[in-house]
Amino acid sequence: MKMVTLAAAAALAIGITGAHAEPVKVGMITTLSGGGAGLGIDVRDGFLLAVKQAGSPDLEVIVEDDQRKPDIAVQLADKMVQSEKVDVLTGIIWSNLAMAVVPSVTAQGKFYLSPNAGPSALAGKGCHPNYFNVAWQNDNLHEAAGAYAKDTGYKNSFILAPNYPAGKDALTGYKRFYDGELAGELYTKLGQTDYAAELAQIRASGADSVFFFLPGGMGISFLKQYADSGIDLPVVGPAFSFDQGILQAVGDAALGVKNTSQWNKDIDNPTNKAFVEAFQAEYGRLPSLYASQGFDTANLLLSAMAKADVKDADAFRAALKEADFASTRGDFKFGPNHHPVQDIYVREVIKEGDVFTNKILAAALTDHADAYAGDCSM
Amino acid sequence: MSFLLLIEQVLNGLQFGIMLFLMAAGLTLIFGVMGLINLAHGSLYMIGAFCAAAVAAATGSFLLGLVAALAGAAAAGALVELVVIRRLYDKDHLDQVLATFALILIFSEGTRWVFGSFPLFLDVPDFLSGPVTLPGGIEYPLYRLTLIVIGLLVALGLYMLISRTRLGIQIRAGENDREMIAALGIDIARLYTIVFALGAALAGLAGALVGAIQSVQVGMGEPVLILAFVVIVIGGIGSIKGALVGAVLVGLTDTLGGIFLPEALKLFLDPSTATSVGSSLASMAIYILMAAVLILRPAGLFGARA
């Protein structure tokens, strides 16, 4: 019985793929359940929107949920490489999951296109010819926040981030461009939801500004409690606590806060305009930066497919490297370590009608590459 | 570190502890009276927060949201008890853990199905927002003070309920000898449903109160659940008084440890290493406290059973 089912499944698989000559098979591993699901859903929806618009019969996408767990992500990657025989993997949101999956799949000759996570270890010594990051290196948005703080003339920042690798990248990134004093530097627990103790320290520290990196629910909690504490210092942070998905949950507490992002819905180019409209029409909500990253990742892949056959790895890699696609961010190119060289903007949280969203104020860093490219030898 | 900052941090620890108490009280009642390990208690906390957020958004009233949280969580608790938990009383603890863990997954995905994957908005009501100035010039958020007061009132109410009412007598009797009170003509099945719904309502209340200053999202209950278990282990399983003392101890240890450990380490380490090592140590502090209590008093501070 088992043999029959297997044979039927095999026949079915041949039937599907047999319709096209050499389709590209993409395995997307992303977070679709649990607390961080909003991010994975946005990346997936952005990616699938681009695939749908292209209407390419040669592209097959398999989507799986990693539940934000490294062990599950590794299992899914093994399954996709060994039994599904995918050519390209993508989708991972979290740096710790990326570290568990990316080195192993690139070593097996597969391509990995990162739509979000950009840990420093994969940008420097651990870079790989088959690994392309379409979003940013982890430090980038924090570096832009540091540059903004310096330009604005902040002299005494209080900085805080969760106690895990991306949190340390964040504070390192901020300090790389900010040159004032530090009124305080705190690592909070990952997943912490009550910031009363930290707020009391900020109040007592005599700081003139606050920088925080607290992605997802942590940022919502922090901002609401910050607004309620009566502390009146300017706040700056990366876009992760101010994306379209969570701003509605923060409400008025986020109004006027400056944050840094490589993308916003008002970046003025035809691709971006069309993307924002199409995304709203398809899913009935405004896109977030994660959605734009998913969309760009799919378009990068499609541009390479138009130029080279995925079975010819060298040609396909060269085609990816050219990044010959219309990005929602405008100009987009890869640096020597296959990470983006791009502009990063300062945005401000505003209210449009009933919806909280961002508008761009200015560019914080232009044609910005990451600090680790020099360590990458490939 | 000034004296005022210290007072403010003690208030923070107290407030955190009191909210933990609301969670732990239900958990310890259910475990003490019914002998049931309920991992899904965190889901009831989440249900309370989502009910409050949905009703507050629809009506614009935070108080109606609180009522909805109490009612919603109690109803969910009663339903779960009737449909699932009832079958688990004579099973061993491992089966209970397995079944209630399944309930967590069902509630989480069910909530996502109804409310979507993005966090909901629930804010502190206008009449409780902003800071107040306490004697001595400490500025402290009014809402957090209110939480402390509400928590203490609930603790007092529970104490009255357990020690002064007929239901309380039945609950205490049920803890000691469930066969005997069944033989005396008490409807033990009904008593269990009531206790479970009461525990659920307390969790829901905590979820709604805390949801206003944190984020209302799927999975918000599990981190609190772990702390609530620590609280009841420290306080002694089944003891409401233990839950209160344990919760305040955990709240104070967690809050003050997070501040003083990095500061203390700065005396002999460079600041960046000190904050990093100090924060890691601080997150261990409550577990070290738990271990210490267990060594000195294996049944917890107020635990009756060994």
Image (cartoon, coloured by chain):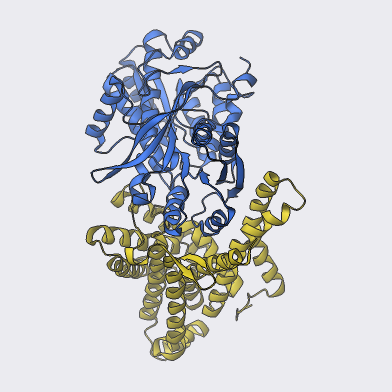
Nearest to the observer: residue A255 or residue B257: A255
The colour chain A appears in is: blue
Residue B28 drawn above or below residue A244: below
Q: Quadrant of residue A329?
A: top left
Q: Inspect this view and state whether residue A1 appears.
A: no
Residue B86's x, y, as percent?
A: 39, 70
Q: Tell me, by letter, which chain the rendering colours yellow.
A: B
Q: Quadrant of the C terminus of chain A?
A: top right
Q: Inspect this view and state whether residue A310 appears.
A: yes
Residue A105's x, y, as percent?
A: 54, 25
Q: Quadrant of the N terminus of chain A?
A: top left
The residue under the point 59% across, 63% down is B5
Residue A165 drawn above or below residue B110: above
Residue B215's x, y, as percent?
A: 41, 54
Residue B267 drawn above or below residue B164: above
Residue B45's x, y, as percent?
A: 41, 63
